Image (cartoon, rainbow, N blue to C red):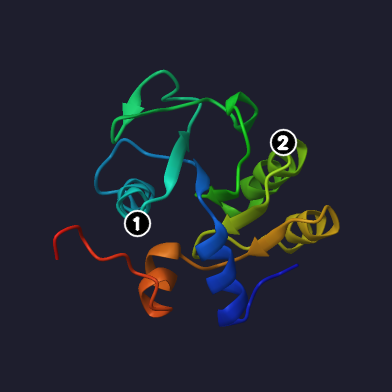
Amino acid sequence: MLLERDQDITALLTSTRRIALVGASSKPERASNQIFAFLLGQGYEVIPVNPGLAGQTLHDVPVVASLAEIEGEIDMVDIFRNSAAAGDTVDEAIAVGAGSVWMQLGVINEAAAGRAVEAGLQVVMDRCPKIEIPRLGLLKRPHGG
């Protein structure tokens, strides 16, 4: 199902525990790096995926080369790739049985979204969880605050 209503996106974000972040960057100025840190701070388990950085760690988490290397269930695949390349990542998400795919701001691939929906995945497209979480009132308070 393509999620566009606030209540559907809220339900997805509150039920998600484990996120594979495809296109993770080691550069602190990159959005993928900042959103990775934000999601960790929100209590999600985040697994960085980047074949060029595989074997390294980002934010103290080991980087894997592909979704297929992740053991266990993946609730969400957060995609930081261009719209054309997102299609391959969506196909990988379907293949590994992920629960949902989230295409970041500016990432729009209607054909891939259609394949994911047809395979039973929930899909969010052209949105950012770092924007949606506070907007929807889901921001976790820092400890001790």
Residue 12 image offset from top left, x and y in percent: 58, 64
| Label 2: few (<14), some (14–19) or many (≥20) C-alpha neighbours in 10 Å | some
Q: In the picture shown, does residue 4 fall above or below 141?
A: below
Q: Nearer the viewer, mark 2 or mark 1?
A: 1
Q: Which mark is residue 139?
A: none
| Label 1: few (<14), some (14–19) or many (≥20) C-alpha neighbours in 10 Å | some
Q: Mark 2 or 1 closer to N-term?
A: 1
- The residue at the far left in this view is 144
Amino acid type assigned to the residue bearing label 1 in the image = Gln
Q: In the picture shown, does residue 94 fall above or below 105?
A: above
- Residue in the picture at 51% in, 68% down: 127
Q: Secondary structure at mark 1?
A: loop
Q: State which quadrant residue 55 falls in.
A: top left
- Residue in the picture at 45% in, 22% down: 54
Q: State which quadrant residue 108 falls in.
A: bottom right
Q: Is residue 31 visible?
A: yes
Residue placed under numbered mark 1 in the picture: 42
- Report how far apart the C-alphas of labels 2 and 1 lie in the structure: 25 Å
Residue 115 image offset from top left, x and y in percent: 81, 54
Q: Nearer the viewer, residue 26 or 67?
A: 67
Amino acid type assigned to the residue bearing label 2 in the image = Val
Q: Which mark is residue 96?
A: 2
Left/right placement of residue 131 relative to residue 103 reads left
Residue 139 image offset from top left, x and y in percent: 33, 69
Q: Is residue 106 visible?
A: no
Position of the C terminus, as image quadrant, is bottom left
